Image: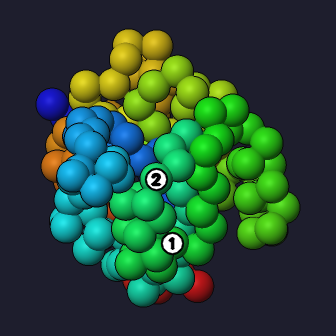
Amino acid sequence: MFMSIDVNKVKKIKMLVMDVDGIMTDARIIKGSDGEWKRFFSVRDGVGILELKKRGYKTAVITGSNSLDVRQRMQHLKIDYFFENKLDKEPAFEELKKEAGLTDEEISYIGDDIFDIPLLKLVGFSATVPEAIEDVKKECDYITSRNGGYGAVRDLCHIILSHGYFCEGKK
């Protein structure tokens, strides 16, 4: 599926904010023998995030989850700002903007469910995955070519790196 991208929106992006379940994972959760929840994260997404960071972009996660595996993955990726246990994501987003010193139009957000809609409406460039709920898809500037947990974040990172504020020749 080909989707037109508003490059003028992408050029302003300085930070990528992500949801976890259904975006960085395939939305499945299993309980391990140790009683902890476990998710599968895409290594490809991690590479995309690290490439963004290397080029000067900030990263953040706002998730409704409150789980050890999520915290460990975010630490491993050195996510700049991490907010967990936030079903109402707007207060965390407002705090994030204040801490990072950024405006709505300088932030890209990727989410897939009803909790994400308020942020998708606020940000400069909004994205989701093909399997997101229809109400989310209606609010997005871009639908990734890959599913959540299977390289969706990497896809969005590629768009940002190809057209964004910190792309070659811009600083």
In the displayed structure, would residue 75 be above or below residue 8? below
In the displayed structure, would residue 62 be above or below residue 113? below
The foreground one among 127 and 71 is 71
In which quadrant of the rendered view does residue 86 lie?
A: top right
Q: Secondary structure at mark 1?
A: loop
Relative placement, left or right, of 97 versus 19 is: right
Position of residue 48 measured from the top left corner of the image (x, y, whole percent): 30, 69
Position of residue 42 measured from the top left corner of the image (x, y, whole percent): 20, 59
In which quadrant of the rendered view does residue 54 lie?
A: bottom left
In which quadrant of the rendered view does residue 17 lie?
A: bottom right
The foreground one among 19 and 7 is 19
- Residue that label 1 marks: 79
Q: Secondary structure at mark 2?
A: loop
Question: Which residue: 38% across, 13% down?
Answer: 134
Circle 1/circle 2 CB separation < 8 Å: no
Question: Which residue: 41% across, 70% down?
Answer: 72
Question: Which residue: 55% across, 31% down?
Answer: 116
- Residue that label 2 marks: 67
Question: Which residue: 79% across, 42% down?
Answer: 91
Relative placement, left or right, of 57 versus 28 is: right
In the displayed structure, would residue 74 be above or below residue 5? below
Position of residue 30 measured from the top left corner of the image (x, y, whole percent): 23, 41
Amino acid found under the numbered disc labelled 1: Ile
Give the class, few, some or many, for how many residues have Cα within 10 Å of label 1's Cα (few <14, many ≥20).
some
